[in-house]
Amino acid sequence: MADWTNCLNFGISIAKQASEIVLSAFQQEKEVKLKSSPADLVTETDQRVEKILISTIKDKYPEHRFIGEESVAAGEPVELTDSPTWIIDPIDGTVNFVHRFPFVAISIAFTVNKQTEFGIVYSCVEDKMFYAQRGRGAFVNGDPLHASGQEDVRKCVVVTEIGSERDDLALSIMTSNIFRVLKLPVHGIRALGTAAVDMCQVATGGADAYYHIGMHCWDIAASAIIVQEAGGVVMDTDGSEFDMMSRRVIAASSAAVANDIARVIKAFPCPRDDEDIRVCTSPAGGSSTPLHEEEEKEETRK
């Protein structure tokens, strides 16, 4: 088995370098553009950081491939092949970055043969470097990470996000999912505004579970291996095997907690990342059948 430690160390070093650009722009006014919705933003800093990361990696590893959030937004396809591939989110938590809410992260995952070999999440304002390598554990600033191991969902803190999908159906399902999880019941629900940092909270044991629908592979590929290497469980929201391209994830302290959450939450329709990310659910602002009506129809069919 190939040893990708040198690539990991290189990724950590360039994440730290790129964070200087993020932090220098953090307190400044930003020129903000909308992408798919009023909650899906991009700044010049997102684009600049991604270009620097990719060009720096290409200089050292010219044969490697890339999937980058802003590159995809500019029209490049999402193609995960067997080749060594860097999956990059230059600023996870752009809305936070724009509003100076102190949770923004650089997320870098590295895959070979479509399997994640390592993940790096650098929470820039906190100065916390989360990282994990397959089979070698997870760490934050050099200290080992351990998920809580909690198996009773009634004793859990759960992290989630509303996300950038704002059509009626997506909003109805997302808010209804929060209701369902609270009624399990759980101790509480939290949201930090960045999927990468949210999932890393499960790896630290500070949260016991995270779930989300509608995020992208660059949001969660790195943090998924960090959770797994910390002893946590990562799966699809329907309880099946985790697929970073599916845009659905549960990360939890244990299989028992993950399965309890999978049992109650529902997913809204989203195309896979490797299909066409330009369209998700119904057009923004479009009307959809309210969730309670869908559930009534479902009960009638039963």
Image (cartoon, grey):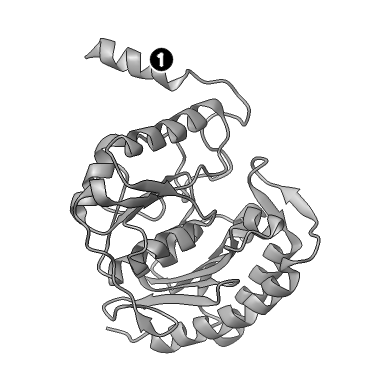
In the rendered view, would you say 210 is above or below 144? above
* Residue in front for this viewpoint, 293 or 100: 100
Q: Secondary structure at mark 1?
A: helix
- Image side of residue 218 versus residue 82, left or right: right
Q: Could you say where residue 216 lies in the image, as x and y percent from the top left?
A: 49, 52
- Residue that appears at 61% across and 63% down: 102
At a point 40% along the width and 18% down the height, the residue shown is 292
Q: Quadrant of the N terminus?
A: bottom left
Q: Residue at x 75, y 69 (%)?
A: 25
Q: Is residue 81 visible?
A: no
Instruction: Find disc 1 in the rendering and name its residue.
Output: 293
Give how far across and how far down residue 257 sits, in percent.
Answer: 23, 50
Q: Is residue 130 above or below residue 202?
A: below
Tell me which amino acid carries mark 1: Glu
Where residue 274 appears, as percent x and y from the top left, is 46, 51
Task: Tell me where residue 104 sits by quadrant.
Answer: bottom right
Residue 195 visible in image: yes
Q: Residue furthest bottom?
A: 6
Give x and y (percent) for residue 203. 34, 67
